[in-house]
Amino acid sequence: MFDRIALIGIGLIGSSLARVIAQKGLARHVAIASRSVDTLKRAEQLKLGQSYHTDPAEAVREADLVIVSVPVGSSGAVAEAIAPALKPGTILTDVGSTKASVIAQMSPFVPEGVHFIPGHPLAGTEKSGPDAGFADLFVNRWCIFTPLPDTDPAALDRLAAFWRACGSNIDVMDATHHDKVLAIVSHLPHIIAYNIVGTADDLQNVSKTEVIKYAASGFRDFTRLAASDPTMWRDVCLHNRDAILEMLSRFSEDLAALQRAIRWGDGDKLFDLFTHTRGVRRSIIDAGQEIDVPDFGRHVAEQPAKS
Amino acid sequence: MFDRIALIGIGLIGSSLARVIAQKGLARHVAIASRSVDTLKRAEQLKLGQSYHTDPAEAVREADLVIVSVPVGSSGAVAEAIAPALKPGTILTDVGSTKASVIAQMSPFVPEGVHFIPGHPLAGTEKSGPDAGFADLFVNRWCIFTPLPDTDPAALDRLAAFWRACGSNIDVMDATHHDKVLAIVSHLPHIIAYNIVGTADDLQNVSKTEVIKYAASGFRDFTRLAASDPTMWRDVCLHNRDAILEMLSRFSEDLAALQRAIRWGDGDKLFDLFTHTRGVRRSIIDAGQEIDVPDFGRHVAEQPAKS
């Protein structure tokens, strides 16, 4: 499908791409770049590509597809570093969780003739690094493109075909809308998870040991998102600030109303909210975006250990 | 282990008990009571016990262990209904998520000679009803007792042995402390999950369809707790009000600080919090209270569907 694909960054997303590209034969040569020598060495041990580079410019030379998979705060620096080595006709894309900021950072460096198409595959786990990736990470997940006004439709089609080959569904929207949507479906949940885990870890009257021991009663669900990569999530908070602050303010408003219902013993109001939210999960399962197994399938996955 | 066990309420917890009692042979006769005729009929179809009663007093007659598994707001009514039929020496316990309120509701009705031992198995899924239970729900989960000052140690030992036979680990603490601990490890996570799902379902600039489609980027994790039984959770909110309000207030305080760090671009503060919380999940896995598989094992559980 491509002759040479350059993967700049080889963490969870980059290494999952490397694996699916190899599995499906989507490129003749995969060039891998990481500024961390250790990460690069590990990628080589895992045989994730055909060449390995600490200088991203070397990796992108002669590449016809360049995928930048780094924390969004580093997008500008990467774009600056690779720009002189990009050949005309190359498709340059990224996988960042915020799009307006990535566009603002990268666009100024993109040379004439290079097709810059910002993208975001909505896929991941709480793990990071080259060992964490797997080939079917993108299967049945959405990949959102936020093309620029002058994006070449043929290049967009070619990139979409690549992501479809990785198993993804494709959507297209503008960057500002993407950032609002992701603020509610992804950024707010992560921030709330980080916050509640922080609160629980910082109490006087309940010990840390108790929080750990009794975590299966609900708390542990939040610890997964709160175990996500700190650099990535710091950058998301810094680079999608306005949309996140808006969602946080709505969340806090709603929480104040819920808190008031608890204080005043308004059982009907509580019951209505708790009934209403039940249907949302059903819809997500019906949309194929969650498995239809109780407890996230934990009981299925741990069966061998238990019995 | 017991001659006759009466299960008052045959939802997720009650029906899981019925299944493990049958599997391990922990009683000669299991008497099942539900005030819902449909639920009782379903329990009978599932062959969960030996006798079925709409009147809980009939179920407890001649029982040497009575386990009340109803929403905590119904505990008092159940105790009043069964009290005249309890025989001396019977152990009466419950599985409610709040303990001070259950003790206040049930104690006044407990006859002389009956051993009332409040209990709480920290186990469950987001599903409810007699079909939702399974025999190994309690394996490796904690069951907390909050005995009263005059609790007979021999009766407590006997009840603990029963729960151990169901697979549980046992802890003992006072009711007030239990309610504080559960407010942070269970009640607050559920309330926050209900709240965020409510917020996401109620936006103008992001459609419900988008929230559903893109839920795999984080949001879906919260929908599991927010799909829990509404009656149960309304009652928990009403019956552990003070401890919940305290935890909510700490949570909101911490969230305000986090929001401020986002507003002012304090990357170091964000990075510190996000790094710190990562270790908490590791501790929960090490304590055997979470599975050591990325993404809650979703990828394991859905493997057949994907490949």
Image: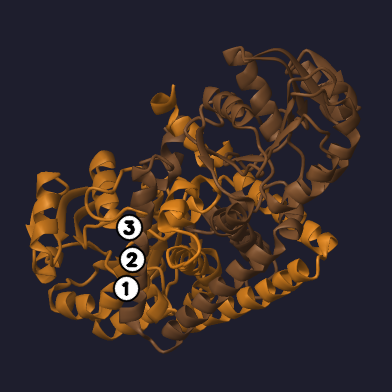
Chain colours: A orange, B brown
Instruction: Estimate the x, y position of residue A121 in percent, counting from the top left.
Output: 41, 59
Q: Which residue does the image show at 70% across and 51% down from the upper left?
A: A278
Say few, some or many: other residues with alpha carbon within 10 Å of mark 3 (under 14 / 14 to 19 / 20 or more): few
Marks 1,3: beta carbons within 8 A = no
Which residue matches tag 2? B276
Please, is residue B118 above or below residue B88 in the view?
Answer: below
Q: In front: A285, or A63? A: A285
Going from N to C along the chain, the mark reached first, 1 or 3, is 1
Q: Which residue is mark 3?
A: B279
Q: Do the residues under discs 2 and 1 have CB atoms within 8 angstroms?
A: yes
Gap in angstroms between the C-alphas marked 2 and 3: 6 Å
Q: Nearer the viewer, residue A73 or A99?
A: A73
| Nearer to me, B240 or A128 | B240
The chain ID associated with circle 3 is B
The answer to whether the residue labelled 2 contacts the one labelled 3, judged by CB atoms less than 8 Å apart, is: yes
- Residue A164 lies, in percent from the top left, at 41, 50
Tag 2, which chain?
B
Q: Is residue A26 visible to the viewer in this orientation of the structure?
A: no
Side (left or right) of B80 relative to B240:
right
In what element is the residue under mark 1?
A: helix
Q: CA separation, marks 1 and 3? A: 12 Å
Is B17 situated left or right of A205 in this image? Answer: right
Amino acid type of the residue tagged 1 in the rendering = Asp
Q: SS at mark 2?
A: helix
Judging depth in this view, the residue of A102 and B89 nearest the camera is B89
Q: Report the disc number at residue B272.
A: 1
Measuring 12% from the left and 71% from the top, which residue is drawn there? Answer: A57
Residue A235 found in image quarter: bottom left
